[in-house]
Image (cartoon, helix red, strand yellow):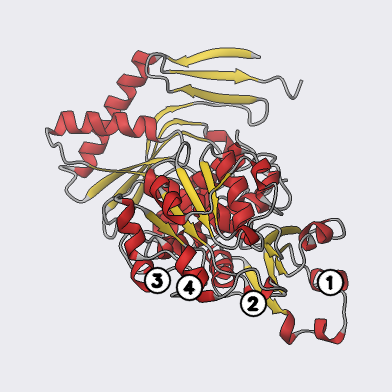
Amino acid sequence: MEKRLILNHKEIEIILKRLAMELIENHNDFSNSAIIGLQPRGVFPARMLVEYVKEFTKNPHILYGELDHTFYRDDFRRGNEQLVAHPIRIDFDIEGKNIILVDDVVYTGRSVRSAMDALTSYGRPAKIELLALLDRRFNRETPIMSDYCGKVIDTRGMGQKVLVDWNPKKLNVWLLNTHEEE
Amino acid sequence: MKDFNHKHLIGIKDLSAEDINLVFETADNFKEVINRPIKKVPTLRDTTIANIFFENSTRTRVSFELAEKRLSADVVNFSSSSSSVSKGETLIDTVKNILSMKVDMVVMRHPSPGACVFLSKHIDANIINAGDGTHEHPTQALLDAFSIREKLGDVKGKKIAIVGDITHSRVAISNIYCLKKLGAKVKLCGPPTLIPKHIESLGVEVDYNLDNVVKWADVVNMLRIQMERQDIAYFPSLREYSMQYGLTQERVERSGKELIIMHPGPINRGVEITSEVADSKNAIILNQVENGVAIRMAVLYLLAGDK
């Protein structure tokens, strides 16, 4: 398996800081906004983002939650693996709020679709936005677009994987060629 | 990736500790779902489930039906008293006819031990045992252990007493398997006539004195006397049983500690447990019922999701 580094630790931090600034540009003091990380992997960039937003706005009260979309997925029973759920932590009312959904990689857009279903069973947000650290823009299977994007990567669908190593000591983004097609 | 790898849930005997913990972790998520304002997820919207009950039931049946509906499955209910079984149709014929109407999963309660295993050899659908005679009642054992875990943080190393009619209780057998697999210490208590010989081979202890057992235990699970399964008199009178093996407030206080009291229901108040104890703050009987829905959602989800 071929492995190529796309982003290193430093670059990821710079990108997330830039995205935090973009969020502040649109959401001012975050009084009616909340950041929600998508389980399982979107919570890592989301937690970092929240810290940056707190630091830049000097506001320690940024609403933050974590959402799991397992029970809303459209590939239940269609894959080979058991889909295992993750905890949901949303301890505020999302009704009327501006919600920023955060995921690490947006690929087909299907998980974002199910996440929106999962989110609306908690209430009706005023607005839902999507923030993605990485956007594999040519592989979309749904009409979903990120509002905030860290980096666009052009990849083939099959045979390539984008892997973010969220281990805080490593924190790298890798592009894997799995050679399945060759 | 964790895998459940079971097509049916016939008994706890077939599960590993990892399987049981996966059910618990999944049930944690479903417990969050059933406490939301919108208590429903669309996961099983393409699944049809038949609840086939050849024996009476309130809790298990309502609990399964709610679990199925909260997963968005289509549900058909069937009970033997109002069906063609009374006209002499066999079990396999009945179930095959129901399945030919495109049913994917069967939840079955039956008075004969082994009815679910028998059925699983003849039909294609996923089968969940909701109690088969005196054999097993796996979802009850799972929700009991889940309730202990919720209350005490863990099941491992905890001392759990099961008191009452062990011989005729499928709840007792499933509980023993489940608790032992999770590393708990289990003691059985009841009249010698209602405790099977050689039950120690399952790794449990037996003590015929309830006061000693209550002093020892962290959790006491009181079972009902299963009159409907007893063909002979196993003890002289209900009054005597109640004096020897009934859990009273006095007995709980004499133990001098915060005892957790469980009961799988239905309760015979004044026989195995007094109203005072059953309604006390130490009793988690209604928590067990609430957890039952989450556990059954988890079991349905894991069985349906396994290829």
**Chain letter of the residue carrying label 2:** B
Same chain for mark 4 and mark 2? The answer is yes
- In front of the other: B23 or B254: B254
> Measuring 70% from the left and 78% from the top, which residue is drawn there?
B78
Same chain for mark 3 and mark 1? The answer is yes
Q: Name the residue under label 2.
A: B56
Instruction: Classify mark 4: helix, strand or loop.
Output: loop
Same chain for mark 2 and mark 3? The answer is yes
Distance between the alpha carbons at the discs numbered 4 and 3: 7 Å
Q: What residue type is labelled 3?
A: Thr
**Chain letter of the residue carrying label 4:** B
Q: Mark 1 points at which residue?
A: B91
Instruction: Classify mark 3: helix, strand or loop.
Output: loop
Q: Name the residue under label 3.
A: B274
Q: Relative to residue A161, is residue A8 depicted above or below? A: above
Q: Position of residue B110 (x, y in %)?
A: 73, 69
Q: Nearer the viewer, mark 4 or mark 2?
A: 4
Q: Mark 4 points at which residue?
A: B271
